[in-house]
Structures are given as structure tokens and as C-alpha cells.
């Protein structure tokens, strides 16, 4: 079967994040099964990502040589047979502000057209399926197909990229720095834990619109020695960060799935995360805490710190 994937998600782990990982793994899996997969991606890059997506989609045309065209998120809304939603943009936009919220609103209108026109709609979690039906007025729930990771490839990366020796209790976050990720809650939790975990270090992988604000918050709380802002990293560096951490933390209030949870589980790391969105579906064994509460998040991290058996049980379950 000849399959066409349509996506404007940056095809690298630094900027494409979990969406890129999901698309890449699916393409390789289908190829391994004997199918032909071709990616249609933007050739013209513009300073504003939403403008780039709109221009890319405007120029797309149907290609009769393909058996099926799969459009990811809003991409392919004029031509795709299958609308594959990695997240529901209208849901994500609810948690953002300012320009980010406005541009995501534009994208959400295109995504709505996508799910209305496509012959089939696929989401990665029940949470996303329900949000898509609610926010886009779908007559029934989309098909749910959970995300994949290439376990063999990821475990090989973990083995080949050990962490440097570290005596500190390290908490890791990986993701794009949007407001919905609630990294500010993690920063405030770190402040609350200063006297309870003296050797605490929080390491943040990723970049995004909130980066400057979060760094300023770190300085205001006097946490420069406890937080490390690593920005975008390579796959090898990412594997090393997972190896280094004592616990993985995801304080997000909106996740369509959360591939980072699978990566942390595959690295046998304990998880502390918000009881929100698709997170309980993907990682029911995690220490799940009240969303938007720095104290609840701090208590969850401290539980793993003081009770190694909790982390060991999670690692076994993962």
C-alpha cells in the first residue's frame, strides 16, 4: 500500500517533540510491514509557524498515486482521507494566552474542517476522542489508536548514553514550554522542596514561548542553583537525561497522550504527574497529584524521594 503522510510538524526531536516521535515511529513501523510511506512536508519556511502551516496546506493537492492520505492534526484538511489527531488543538488552545492562543485558534478552525471532511478520524487517547467530539461537534467518538515508541531503539539509546555520575536527587521534565505544560507549578514545587530535599535538582529539557518567563520566575524564587534549563537537546543527550534522573515529572494539565511518559517508563523511572487529561490513561501507575497545585506536586516528588519502594514498584509496572 502506498501511504502519504501530510504534516508540517518539524521533523526533528528538538522542535517536533512527541508529535514528531509518534509520526516517525508509525512511518517506520508501516515500512517494516512492507508498505510505502511518503511524507509531504513544507518546503517554504516562514517566521510564524501558523502562517507556514496555512501556506503549506493551501498549496497541497490530492495525489491519485496514493492509496490513502493521512493528515496529522490540522494538516491535510483539504485533501486527507484520514484525520489523525495527535492532540486536539481547540483543547490545547483553552490553556494558552495571548498570541499563542490566537494562532492556535486559527489552527483549530482548520482542524475542525479536517475532521468534518475526512472519511476517518483517529485520536491517541479516549481523552482526546471525547474532546474532539465535544469541541468539533462530531456525531461519534473517533477511533482510538494509542501512540507507539520503538522500544528496541529507545533502550539502545539509553544503554549507549549513560549519565555522568551525580549525587543529587534529580527531577526531569521534557516538553515544549507552553503554559498548558504548567512548568511554573514544577518551579514553585521546587521552591517548596528546598528545605525537604536538600540535594534537589530540577532539569528541564525543551524550549517554547514561556521559556523567558520561566527563567525569570526561577530567578525571582532564588532557585538558580536548583534548576537547569537545558533547552533543545539531541536524542543522545535526551537519553542521557532520562538515565540521570531519579524521577520524571509531568505537571501538564493538557496532554493528548504524552509520549514522554512512555519514554520514562521504558527507562524504568518513577513518574509524578498531574491527574489530568490523558495522563491517567497512559500512566495509571504514576504518582498522580492534584493539577495546578505546587504543594501537591511537591508532596508527590517527596514521596518518591523518601519511599524508594514506590519508585521500584512503578519501574516494575512500567
Image (cartoon, rainbow, N blue to C red):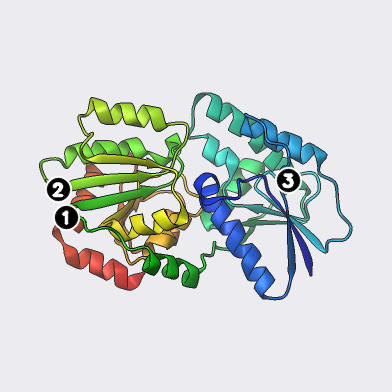
Q: Position of residue 204 (x, y in %)?
A: 35, 44
User: What is the quadrant of the C terminus in the image?
Assistant: bottom left
Disc number lying in front (3 or 2): 2
Are the residues flagged by discs 2 and 1 in contact, CB closer than 8 Å?
Answer: yes
Image location of residue 8, percent across then percent down: 67, 44
Disc on the earlier residue, 3 or 2: 3
Question: Which badge, 3 or 1, is on the more N-terminal residue?
Answer: 3
Badge 2 is on which residue? Answer: 199
At 62% from the left and 70% from the top, the residue drawn is 29
User: In this rendering, does residue 280 appear at all?
Assistant: no
Disc on res. 167: 1
Residue at 35 percent of width and 48 percent of height: 173
Question: At 51% across and 24% down in the image, what residue appears?
Answer: 98
3D distance between C-alphas at marks 2 and 1: 8 Å
* Image-based side of 64 in relation to 243, left or right: right
- Most foreground residue, 63 or 311: 63
Q: How many marks?
A: 3
Task: Give coordinates of residue 1: x percent, y percent.
Answer: 79, 70
In this view, the residue farthest toward the bottom is 33
- Horizontal placement of 95 versus 202: left or right? right
Q: Compare marks 2 and 1 and give the one earlier in the sequence.
A: 1
Label 3 and label 2: CA atoms lie apart by 49 Å
Question: Which residue is at the front of the view, 29 or 304?
Answer: 29
Mark 3–mark 1 contact, CB under 8 Å? no
Relative to residue 160, is residue 95 depicted above or below?
above
Q: In the figure, residue 34 lies in which quadrant?
A: bottom right
User: Which disc, if any, is residue 114?
Assistant: 3
Neighbourhood count class around disc 2 (C-alpha, 10 Å): few under 14, some 14–19, many 20 upward: few
Amino acid at each position: 500500500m502506498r501511504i502519504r503522510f501530510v504534516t508540517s510538524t518539524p521533523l526533528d526531536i528538538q522542535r517536533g517533540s512527541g508529535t514528531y516521535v509518534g509520526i516517525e515511529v508509525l512511518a517506520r513501523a508501516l515500512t517494516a510491514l512492507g508498505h510505502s510511506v511518503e511524507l509531504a512536508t513544507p518546503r517554504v519556511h516562514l517566521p510564524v509557524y501558523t502562517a507556514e502551516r496555512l501556506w503549506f496546506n493551501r498549496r497541497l493537492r490530492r495525489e491519485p498515486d496514493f492509496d490513502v492520505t493521512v493528515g496529522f492534526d490540522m494538516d491535510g484538511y483539504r485533501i486527507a482521507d484520514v484525520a489523525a489527531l495527535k492532540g486536539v488543538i481547540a483543547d490545547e488552545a483553552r490553556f494558552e494566552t495571548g498570541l499563542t492562543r490566537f494562532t492556535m485558534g486559527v489552527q483549530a478552525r482548520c482542524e475542525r474542517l479536517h475532521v468534518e471532511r475526512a472519511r476517518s478520524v483517529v485520536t491517541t487517547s479516549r481523552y482526546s476522542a471525547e474532546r474532539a467530539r465535544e469541541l468539533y461537534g462530531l456525531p461519534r467518538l473517533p477511533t482510538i489508536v494509542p501512540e507507539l515508541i520503538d522500544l528496541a531503539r529507545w533502550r539502545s539509546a539509553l544503554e549507549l548514553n549513560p549519565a555522568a555520575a551525580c549525587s543529587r536527587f534529580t527531577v526531569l521534565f521534557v516538553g515544549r514550554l507552553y503554559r498548558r505544560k504548567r512548568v511554573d507549578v514544577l518551579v514553585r514545587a521546587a521552591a517548596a522542596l528546598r528545605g525537604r530535599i536538600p540535594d534537589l535538582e530540577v532539569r528541564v529539557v525543551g524550549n517554547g514561548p514561556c521559556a523567558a518567563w520561566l527563567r525569570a520566575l526561577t530567578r525571582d524564587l532564588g532557585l538558580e542553583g536548583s534548576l537547569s534549563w537545558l533547552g533543545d537537546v539531541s536524542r543522545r543527550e535526551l537519553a542521557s537525561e532520562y538515565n540521570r534522573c531519579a524521577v520524571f515529572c509531568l505537571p501538564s494539565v493538557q496532554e493528548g497522550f504524552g509520549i514522554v511518559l512512555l519514554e520514562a517508563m521504558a527507562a524504568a523511572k518513577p513518574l509524578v504527574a498531574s491527574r489530568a487529561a490523558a495522563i491517567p490513561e497512559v500512566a495509571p501507575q504514576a504518582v498522580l497529584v492534584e493539577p495546578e497545585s505546587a504543594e501537591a506536586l511537591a508532596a508527590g516528588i517527596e514521596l518518591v524521594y523518601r519511599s524508594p519502594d514506590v519508585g521500584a514498584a512503578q519501574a516494575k509496572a512500567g
